[in-house]
Image (cartoon, rainbow, N blue to C red):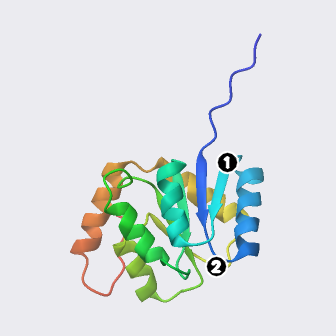
Amino acid sequence: MASPTPPPAYRVLVIDDDPSLNEMMVTSLRLLGRYEVISATNGVQGLALCHSAAPDIVLVDVKMPELNGYQVARALRGDPATVDLPLVMLTAMVQERDELIGLYSGVDAYLHKPLSPHQLVETIRDVLALDPHHRLARMHRLVETPAGTLPSEG
């Protein structure tokens, strides 16, 4: 009896200007998540790869040269070709205000550095499971939430 064909690997784009962290994420995602991983070291390069490499999900750092992560997220959400592309923001910026900016920029998840490789893979799986209707409903809840507070997932 032939063994079943494994499902195709998801393609993950990592955009982070820290070479050691970028390499750690690429290696972890390949080994733990069995993902196909491509990477960029700045926002401009990352946006170009979003169009040329067609990733299934994007992980983006906030503080980067050329375009920061918030700008990348808003550019992707504003482009009909990438409006539904799953986005995860990774950052050392841990203030609630920073997270709100990320969520208002359209990211699906906001992770604080440092993070474990297992946490990263688990978050990617969760975000890949979201559908565009869930994303839209979450954005509506965010808009309807009083200014300066994070919405509940309810």
Residue 112, image quadrant: bottom right
User: From the image, which quarter does the N terminus lie in?
Assistant: top right
Q: Quadrant of residue 40?
A: bottom right
> Which residue corresponds to the image point at 24% horizontal and 65% vertical from the top-left?
140
Is residue 55 visible in the rendered structure shown here?
Answer: no
Q: Quadrant of residue 24?
A: bottom right
Residue 144 location, x and y as percent? 21, 73
| Picture residue at 45% right of the left edge, 85% below the top | 98
Tell me if mark 2 has few (under 14), some (14-19) or many (20+) residues whose alpha carbon lies within 10 angstroms of its own: few
| Residue shown at the point (24%, 73%) measured from the top left | 143
In front: label 2 or label 1: 1
Q: Is residue 54 above or below residue 44?
A: above
Mark 1 lies on residue: 35
Rendered location of residue 55, percent (x, y): 53, 50
Say above or below: 72 vs 76: below
Residue 113 — which label?
A: 2
- For badge 2, the amino acid type reads Lys
How far is mark 2 from mark 1, CA to CA?
21 Å
Q: Which mark is residue 135?
A: none
